[in-house]
Amino acid sequence: MRILIDECIDPRVKKLFLDHEVKTVHDMGWDQLADGPLLLLAQDRFDVLVTIDRGLEFQQNLKKLRLGVIVVMVPKNQLIYYESLAAELRAAVEKARPGQVVHIMGERTAN
C-alpha cells in the first residue's frame, strides 16, 4: 500500500507502516500546496492519505478521489498517541478504498 502522511502529522508516524511505501507531504515537496491540488496529485501516486485534518472531508469532495482518507483524532500531535493506535491505523490502511473516509479516534479524544 502506498501511504501519504499529511504535513499536519508528526512525520515519525511513518515508522508505524514499515510494510508499506510511506512518504510525507514534505518528502514529496508538496508542503505549500492547498488541500485541493494536494489531493489531486496524491491520488495518482498514493492509495491512502493519513491526516488529522477533521475538516478535510467537509471542504473537499473526497468521494471522487482515487485514494482513501484516514482521519486520525489524537489529543496531541505526538508519536506516542499514534503508537497507541498503531494496530487500528494499520487495519484502516489495509481496508481503505478510493473515495472512502475512515475515522480513527484515540481514547482521550472520545466525547
Image (cartoon, rainbow, N blue to C red):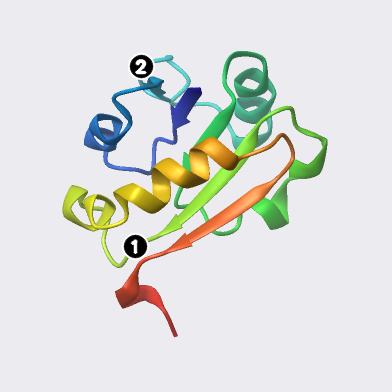
Res 99 → quadrant: top right
Task: Judge whether 85 appears above or below 26 on screen.
Answer: below
Give how far across and how far down residue 82 sits, in percent. 28, 51
Disc 1 from disc 2: Cα separation: 23 Å
The amino acid at mark 1 is Val
What residue sits right under mark 2 in the picture? 27
The 10 Å Cα crowd at callout 1, few under 14, some 14 to 19, many 20 or more, is many
Query: How busy is the neighbourhood of tag 2: few (under 14 within 10 Å), some, or many (20 plus)?
Result: few
- The quadrant in which residue 108 appears is bottom left
Query: Of marks 1 and 2, which one's residue comes earlier in the chain?
Result: 2
Q: Is residue 17 left or right of 68 when viewed as pictured?
A: left
In the visual, does 71 lie left or right of 26?
right
> Farthest residue in the bottom direction?
111
Is the C terminus in the top left, top right, bottom left or bottom right quadrant?
bottom left
Q: For the point 60% across and 22% down, which residue is it?
A: 42
Q: Which sits in the foreground, 13 or 34? A: 13
Q: Name the residue carrying label 1.
A: 74
Relative placement, left or right, of 12 versus 100 is: left
Question: Furthest residue to the right?
Answer: 64
The correct choice, above or below, for 16 with respect to 25 in the image is below
Q: In the image, what residue occupies the spot 69% across and 24% down?
A: 40
